[in-house]
Image (cartoon, rainbow, N blue to C red):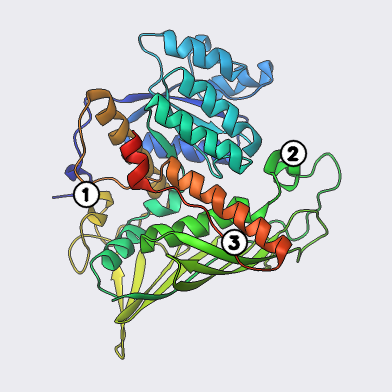
Amino acid sequence: MTGNSAFPKPTRRLKLGFVGGGQGALIGQTHANGARLSNRWDIVAGALSSNPKRARTSGQDWMLDENRVYSDYQTMAREESGRSDGIDAVVIVTPNHLHHSVAKCFMEHGINIICDKPLTKTVDEARELLVLKLRAGVVFGVTYAYSAHVMVRQAREMIRRGMIGEIRQVHVEYFQEWAINITDSGEDAPWRFKREYSGDSMTVADIGTHAAQLASFVCNKPITSVNAEFLVTGSPKQLEDTAFMRLRLNKTIPGTLMVSQAAAGTQCGLRIRVHGTKASIDWQQEKPESLSFTKLDSPTQVIDRGYTAGMLEPATHLVRMPRGHPEALTDAWANLYTEFAIAIDARQHGSTLPDNLVNYPDIVDGVNGMFFVDAAINSNKKGDWVDCEQVSKVNQHRAD
């Protein structure tokens, strides 16, 4: 068996639309490239900008039919839902404050959702989207793409099988430097620096949600409380560019979470270490092909991505190239879009997928991410521990 052959074969390429992401925006191109590499999607429509001229120019750059290039998402949702060849899903890659209204509009037209993180600007918006999702019955994916790396799935499966014993400590970090010399003054300040777009958090909402989701996903346990300190360690700005936290997973497991976008000499330093009673694992996003596995009082084993030699299903379902032929973040994005497509295709055909075949992040992960951000904000204000609300995936799927 070679990787993706474990998945159901597609009956056709699904049709994908985008809201936002035009004008050479990195995140839009990243999503689009992941969808294309998955070989399960055709990008056919978009409201790539709210400026009509920019929307047309971006549509031409993306080689879209001019009749399916829109300057507002409401028109796009209405017209695409009325077409016999309309989109099967919409990708939302706008600033955070628009996620709620765009997702709500497309769900009301019965269209499946793929939304960038964080899910929304506020917790109340996230709660409403969950209610609307359950009512609409659509597939709702959230793009925590790091969880689609093969070796992240390997780590999750090793922990699930008890290979490190009982989890006793979890440590996750994510360090970048891009915001170290940028302030929030002036019209040219990045939108992430502004409360009207990001809410009451910049770095925790942006990359802290990635770190929190990675910890919960790998350990298969929720973050239940946080003790957070928000800091500005780069140029002056109103919202934090750095945060340090103590965590509790599943109420009793201690952990730490550190994030910064003002850490000189770092680029995309996402790392997770999980220590159990028998062994530990260590994975770093900048070295995604390898996973360190160290048993108690033993030398470290390094498991490289590929087939056999310590690799486990379902991680091998996502392997694209044999060992020795490197894969990267682009492959993780393709894995994510593969799983979204499988879930949407199953919904359209009324079929049920086997347990543990796909593990894409969904709206529950998005809502729990917003609960985490809200708890961290409140903890920073109080200077004390704050409990995180949680949505159960079991209850959510029963509600479906």
Give the structural element (helix, strand or loop) at label 1.
helix
Which residue: 43% across, 44% down? 364
Q: Tag 3, which secondary structure? A: loop
The earlier-in-sequence mark between 1 and 3 is 1
Q: Earlier in the sequence, mark 2 or mark 1?
A: 1
How many other residues sit within 10 Å of disc 2, few (<14), some (14-19) or many (≥20)?
few
Q: Which residue is mark 3?
A: 267
277 above or below 353?
Answer: below
Q: In this rendering, which labeled residue sits more in front, label 2 or label 1?
A: 2
Q: Residue at coordinates 70% horizontally, 68% vertically from top-left?
A: 383
Q: How many marks?
A: 3
Quarter of the picture holding the C terminus: top left
What's the residue type where badge 3 is placed? Answer: Gln
Instruction: Please state which of the two labelled residues, at mark 2 or mark 3, is closer to the viewer.
Output: 2
Give the quadrant of residue 281: bottom left
Q: Which residue is mark 2?
A: 196
Query: What's the residue type where badge 2 is placed?
Result: Glu
In the displayed structure, would residue 265 be above or below residue 123? below
Counting from the top left corner in percent of width and height, residue 13 is at: 30, 25
How far is the residue under mark 2 from the one under mark 1?
43 Å
In the image, is residue 360 above or below residue 45? Answer: below
Q: Which residue is mark 1?
A: 3
Choose between 270 and 367: the one closer to the eye.
367
